[in-house]
Image (tube, helix red, strand yellow):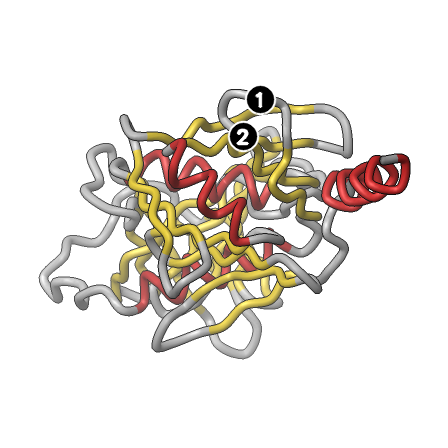
Amino acid sequence: MKNAFLSGCLLFCMSAAPALAEWGFSGAPSPNAFIQTNNMTLEIQCDRIRFAPAGYEDSEDIVNKQGLSIRFMKDGATEVGSFQAGQGNATLQIVDNYPVEIVFQDAADYQFILDQIAANAVLNLSMADQDVSYGIFELSGSGKAIRSLRTSCGSSAQAIDGNMEAPEGVVYCGGGQVTRQIEYQVLDNAQDQWDAIVTVNGKSMRAMTAYSYFGNAPAPQGFIVALLGEDQSEFLVFKDGNANWLEYGDNQYNQCN
């Protein structure tokens, strides 16, 4: 009995510690950001999450209860947000004989979860009705992996309408050997993840906004938003006092209108 008790304590302590591993990214044809340990895997796809816990019985438990608490921690102990996935907002099922697949009914819910994974330090996947963890994952490096995922998922969307009107607003000029004029517009009523338009030298493309671009690191002074273009370009927009500028590649572009 004593040995069984000690074994149970050891198993609990091991499962309660964050999974120490590096986040990775895999591109087309099935883009996903992932972290894998000796006995657990978490895979973030374009429109769903797949979680393979340490034991098949945990997968069965999650699906039987039709609930999973997705908890975001700024460190190992302080919870800063959570999302309760269940019958009212998601579909939970076992796929490929083992992982639990969570498909969210509202794309905005999924985008919230991706934002939180990219911005925080630890992710705790636990029972919806108890403070018992199925798996705890370190999020160091997740911000870069999520940015790559969003860019790759968006790049497979339909091409932008060639007649799209160029944005009107602040114009940024400059560059190195190649001079560019850049404008952008954030859309008020976007129908999908492409909620901005960026125009470079008169050529427009769709982009996604990212307000937590730097992951766990503090944003530089004046940072407003990152614009992730569908061609995998990245534009960082800044405003500090009367100064407006945009960073693209290794160059800075200052307001010129």
Callout 1 environment at 10 Å: few (<14), some (14 to 19), or many (20+)?
few
SS under mark 1: loop
Picture coordinates of residue 87, whole percent (x, y) = 29, 30
Q: Between residue 103 and residue 180, name the one nearer to us.
A: 103
Picture coordinates of residue 237, whole percent (x, y) = 51, 46
Q: Is 256 above or below relative to 105?
A: below
SS under mark 2: loop
Q: Disc 1 marks which residue?
A: 130
Q: Quadrant of the C terminus?
A: top left
Q: Residue at point 55% right, 36% down? A: 239
Residue 215: numbered disc: none
Picture coordinates of residue 20, whole percent (x, y) = 76, 55
Q: Quadrant of the N terminus?
A: top right
Q: Is 246 above or below relative to 61?
A: below
Callout 2 environment at 10 Å: few (<14), some (14 to 19), or many (20+)?
many
Q: Is 79 above or below relative to 191?
A: above
Rounded to the nearest angstrom, the CA distance separating label 2 from label 1 is 5 Å
Q: Disc 2 marks which residue?
A: 127
The amino acid type, in three-letter code, at marker 1 is Gln
Q: Is residue 141 left or right of residue 230?
A: right
Q: Residue at point 18% right, 42% down? A: 191
Picture coordinates of residue 123, whole percent (x, y) = 62, 40
Q: Residue at point 34% right, 43% down? A: 92
